[in-house]
Amino acid sequence: MADEATTTPLLASYKAKPTTKAPSIDDAIETYIGDTGAGQLFKAILLAFAWAFDAQQVFISVFTDAEPHWHCTGYDTSCSPAASTASSPCALPHGAWAWDRPAETSVVSEWALKCAGPALVSLPASSFFAGCLAGGFLLTTLADSLLGRKKMLLLSLVSMSVAGVLTAFSPNVWAYAALRFVCGFGRSMVGTCALVLSTEIVGKRWRDTVSVAGFACFTVGFLSLPALAYAFRDASWRNMYLYTSLPSLAYSVLLYFLVQESPRWLLVRGRKHDAIQTVRQIASLNGGGITCSFSMLHACATECDDAGGVGGGGVFATLQSMWERRWAMRRLAAIMTASFGVGMVYYGMPLNVGNLGGSNLYLSVTYNALAEFPSSILSWLLMGRINRRSSVIALTALAGVCSLACVVIPEGSAFRMAAEVFSFFATCTAFNIILMYSIELFPTTVRNSAVGMVRQALVLGGVAAPMLVALGRERSFWSFGVFGLAVGCLGLFAACLPETRGRSMSDTMEEEEIKEAAAAVLSSTATSDMDDDNAVLV
């Protein structure tokens, strides 16, 4: 019998060198910047504060376009005190009634839009959301391709702020609606770029926290509006635009000098030197210098180039990259459909508070704004403990039920106000989770474009909301009823999405495809093992 040692193949004792995979950009960046420090967190939260100015422009029309109360003047017997509670004074003679406050407090009273019909009254708000929609579709790929996150954010902020200042000098409703369109066009990328950039400059540990900080800043901006409107309750509505747009312009200048571009985007675009310089600056904020080489970052950049990053493509290369992959389009279609219903309620409910009946406008909007604070906290808790997919489905169902309840509960009831606030609260939480979910569903090469498309679906729901609110003044089903059916039914499309909780973010489409294939294999294996176990039991 031959000796075992002599029959063993010579190469069997040779320990093959394992194949090394290039590190992910997450791992490489965190290796060099170390733990996220106070300086880095400050810049991330400073970026997140862009959401405050975003919120102000979104909901400012709740007050500037509000329908004021009116009263009988006493000079005409055709107008009785009881008539002032009627829905419209349009049938009364001229001079028989007057506004409770100066005409310049609202565009409706200043330009006599009360009797012009719901289409003209809702035109400025619808124009704003139409501008958001147009800007989103035309600008969404620029942050992934040519401009980057920082330049796109600054461009959006400046254009939104300048349009807001000019809006204060509108001579008529047509110029007002046109400037609101321009403001919405500029605003379209503010929240998206702020969210993506703030989450890409911190490590995985702080990503959820920074996202929630952005949502909290949005709440701060929303909450500032009732206070500002109350301070100017007897002054011109034009003050609202000046006092929200000028600080936004100053904030843009501050961002220009204090915030760097995303190192992830720089690496994916092949700008290795700029990425290394940015990482050095971030590392210095965390209190430590870098003495080792940057071979890991170079390896990441090389792998991104080899994997087909869209750095050399045109402006719409990112959308083409998603269009060519069924899994990407399936994800995008599902999350955009769910987002449409969420957006309709999210943007429509604050505009609809005037249809609750018997409620104070300032307090009603304040309650809605305050609902966003616990919503931000709940979003943070849910993202850390519960699957994204289940959260979206449950929250949209709750929002739908509460909104439908507002149809049957009598006007002026405290229960109706509570149902409206609960519906808005659930919608806010779903809104927050959907945005974070969309960041995790798509890789760096198309992330800003994908998140931008999701936000456009949210805004598209907002485009329909003002007209539904105007129709809801006559019959509440057209506002609360349609809102409830839309958010409840369309939220079910989230069931078509994969779960992303606990996963690292991908940098290229190919890397995401590998993860998708691995997940499919694991799912198939688990199903096969379960079938085998059942067969043994039988």
Image (cartoon, grey):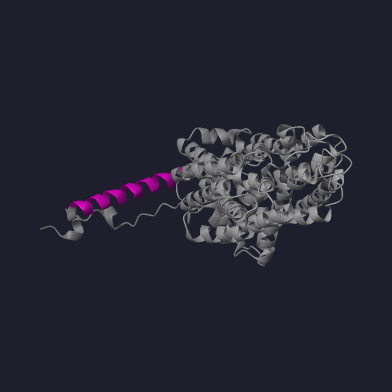
Q: How many marks?
A: 0
Measured as percent of width and height from the top left, residue 323 is found at 52, 33
Q: Is residue 25 visible?
A: yes
Q: Residue at x 52, y 44 (%)?
A: 508
Residue stretch rendered in magenta on the structure: 513-535
Of 477 and 123, nearer the camera is 477
Above or below for 224 versus 96: below
Vertical placement of 531 versus 213: above or below?
Answer: above
Q: Position of residue 186 (x, y in %)?
A: 73, 40
Secondary structure mostly taken by the magenta-highlighted segment of the chain: helix
Q: Residue at x 55, y 61 (%)?
A: 205
Residue 44 sits inside the magenta stretch: no
In front of the other: 320 or 232: 232
**Residue 439 x/y as whole percent:** 56, 48
Which residue: 62% across, 37% down? 460
Query: Does residue 448 show up?
Result: no
In the image, is 322 to the left or to the right of 161?
left
On the rendered structure, is 183 left or right of 384? Answer: right
Q: Is residue 521 magenta?
A: yes
